[in-house]
Image (cartoon, rainbow, N blue to C red):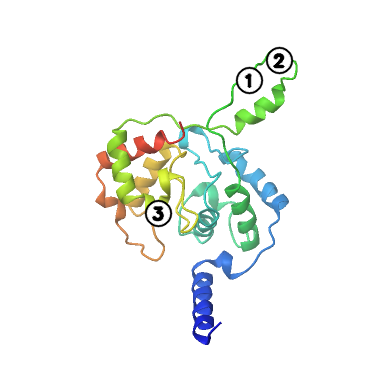
């Protein structure tokens, strides 16, 4: 490898490390620790990160690892306000290694969108296994709006950050929107528009959502709500 290529590779790695704290330091993943931390999270977000109370608590299962980690840091550093989180997140209670463990643990949880049909009268039917399977099954109710128009707007404006059909982008830590409670998404829109929540820490005055009308967002959310059908 030439000197120029070595220099380029080093520079690229340095930039990635500086922009991604979890890449800057390698942590040995401890799934048991992630599971233990999740026991605390489950009080609000559910045993499998599925959220609850129609979006009062958001789904966090399957979100990109770095997105979860970034939000935990914002809560920890008091840059994102949430009274329910303040009690549990600070440098002492949630160091970076713990943030990595719980973020990866949650990112690797897969929730089904529907239960496979079974014969409950079959002799080998396992009621307990079926109960566990149902707990890991989640489908968002269809939201009002023009689904076809929402799809067009989404594909033009949103998919580069939030991934194809809204299932998140693990390359740039873009959060999953499909499979998320519509009521929760609307609350985040309000908080982003009023600067109660920042869209980009490096650009705190980002007014991205102001480019969308309420009808645009209604249609986008209608489209996203059927992606798990």
Question: Vertical placement of 79 versus 57: above or below?
Answer: below
The residues tagged by marks 3 and 1 sit, at their Cα atoms, a distance apart of 38 Å
Left or right position of 56 against 155: right
Pointer 3 local density, CA inside 10 Å: few below 14, some 14–19, many at least 20: some
The residue identified by callout 3 is 161
State the image coordinates of residue 185 (x, y, percent, origin top left). 40, 42
Q: Residue at x 37, y 41 (%)?
A: 186
Of discs 3 and 2, which sits in the foreground? 2
Question: Vertical placement of 174 versus 96: above or below?
Answer: above
Q: Mark 1: which secondary structure?
A: loop
Of discs 3 and 1, which sits in the foreground? 1
The residues tagged by marks 1 and 2 sit, at their Cα atoms, a distance apart of 8 Å
Total numbered circles: 3
Dividing the picture into quarters, in which one does residue 120 lie? top right
Q: Given the current orientation, which residue lies at the most extreme top position?
A: 121
Ranked by sequence position, the earlier of labels 3 and 1 is 1
Residue 122 got which mark?
Answer: 2
State the image coordinates of residue 43 (x, y, percent, origin top left). 61, 39
Q: Residue at x 66, y 49 (%)?
A: 37
Residue 118 got which mark?
Answer: 1
Left or right position of 41 against 30: left
In contact (CB < 8 Å): disc 1 and disc 2: yes
Q: Residue at x 53, y 46 (%)?
A: 84
Give the quarter of the figure containing the C terminus. top left
Q: Mark 2: which secondary structure?
A: loop
Q: Mark 3: which secondary structure?
A: helix
State the image coordinates of residue 104 (x, y, percent, origin top left). 61, 53
Near-viewer residue (183 or 4): 4
């Amino acid at each position: 490898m030439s000197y120029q290529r070595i220099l380029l590779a080093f520079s690229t790695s340095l930039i990635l490390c500086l922009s991604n704290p979890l890449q800057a330091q390698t942590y040995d993943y401890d799934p048991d620790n992630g599971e233990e931390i999740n026991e605390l999270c489950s009080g609000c977000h559910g045993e499998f990160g599925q959220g609850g109370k129609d979006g009062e608590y958001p789904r966090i299962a399957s979100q990109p690892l770095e997105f979860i980690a970034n939000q935990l840091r914002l809560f920890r550093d008091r840059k994102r306000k949430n009274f329910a989180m303040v009690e549990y997140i600070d440098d002492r209670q949630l160091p970076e290694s713990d943030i990595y463990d719980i973020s990866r643990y949650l990112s690797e949880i897969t929730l089904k969108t529907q239960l496979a049909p079974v014969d409950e009268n079959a002799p080998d039917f396992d009621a307990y296994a079926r109960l566990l399977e149902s707990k890991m099954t989640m489908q968002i109710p269809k939201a009002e709006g023009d689904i076809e128009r929402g799809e067009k707007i989404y594909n033009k404006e949103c998919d580069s950050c939030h991934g194809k059909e809204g299932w998140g982008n693990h390359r740039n830590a873009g959060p999953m929107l499909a499979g998320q409670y519509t009521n929760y998404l609307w609350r985040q829109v309000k908080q982003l528009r009023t600067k109660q929540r920042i869209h980009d820490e490096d650009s705190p005055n980002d007014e991205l959502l102001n480019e969308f009308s309420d009808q645009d967002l209604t249609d986008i959310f209608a489209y996203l709500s059927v992606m798990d059908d």
